[in-house]
Amino acid sequence: MAQKLLEHALQNESPSLSSLEVKSAGVAAYPGDRASENAVRALKKVGIELEDHRSQPVTSNLLAESLAVFCMTENHRRLLNAQFSNLPEHVYLIREFLPAEKGREVPDPFGADLEAYEACRDSMVEAIPPILRFLKTLV
C-alpha cells in the first residue's frame, strides 16, 4: 500500500520527484505473492489499484539502488541493519517526519480485517506530505 500511495502523491510533484521510482519490498516477503484482498479493497476505496502488485523481498541490490528507505516499524529497520551492510544513508520510519506524539510506527495489518487495513492506509497517507518535503531535499 505504501508504494502505491507514494507513487500517487509523486504524480503531482515536479519532474525531479515525479520521476522517482518507488519500490516495495519486505523483510519477510515471499517473491510474487499478491497483495491481500483487504489491502486491495482499502486502496480501491481511495481510487488506487493494487491488484497487479507482487511482493518481493529486500535485497542488497535493491538497497544499493535506493535513495531512501522507509520502514513501517522499528523492528523492520533493526532487521535491515542486522541483515545488510550496504544500507543507504537515509533509512527512516515512514512516520518519522511527523511529530513524535502522532506515533512513529505503522502496525502491520497482515491477516487483519478491512478496518485495520484502512487504518494502516490512513496512517501512511498522513505521513506522505512530510516525506515529500524530505525527498525534495535529496533531489
Image (cartoon, rainbow, N blue to C red):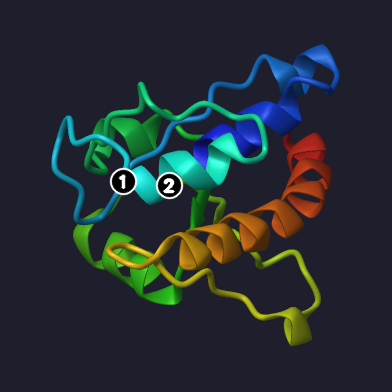
Q: How many marks?
A: 2
Amino acid type, callout 1: Ser
Left or right of residue 84: residue 71: right
Left or right of residue 96: residue 66: left
Tell me where residue 119 appears, x and y as whole percent: 59, 65
Question: Can residue 67 be seen in this snapshot?
Answer: no
Is residue 19 positioned above or below 28 on the image?
Answer: above
Q: Residue furthest left?
A: 30
* Secondary structure under the numbered disc 1 in the rendered image: loop
Residue at image point 74% right, 32% down? 9
Tell me where residue 56 appears, x and y as whole percent: 24, 36
Question: Can residue 16 be seen in this snapshot?
Answer: yes
Q: Are marks 2 and 1 in contact (CB under 8 Å)?
A: yes
* Nearer to the camera, 104 or 51: 51
Q: Which mark is residue 36?
A: 1
Residue at image point 52% right, 69% down? 106
Image quadrant in which you'd find residue 61: top left
Image quadrant in which you'd find residue 63: top left
Amino acid type, callout 2: Ala
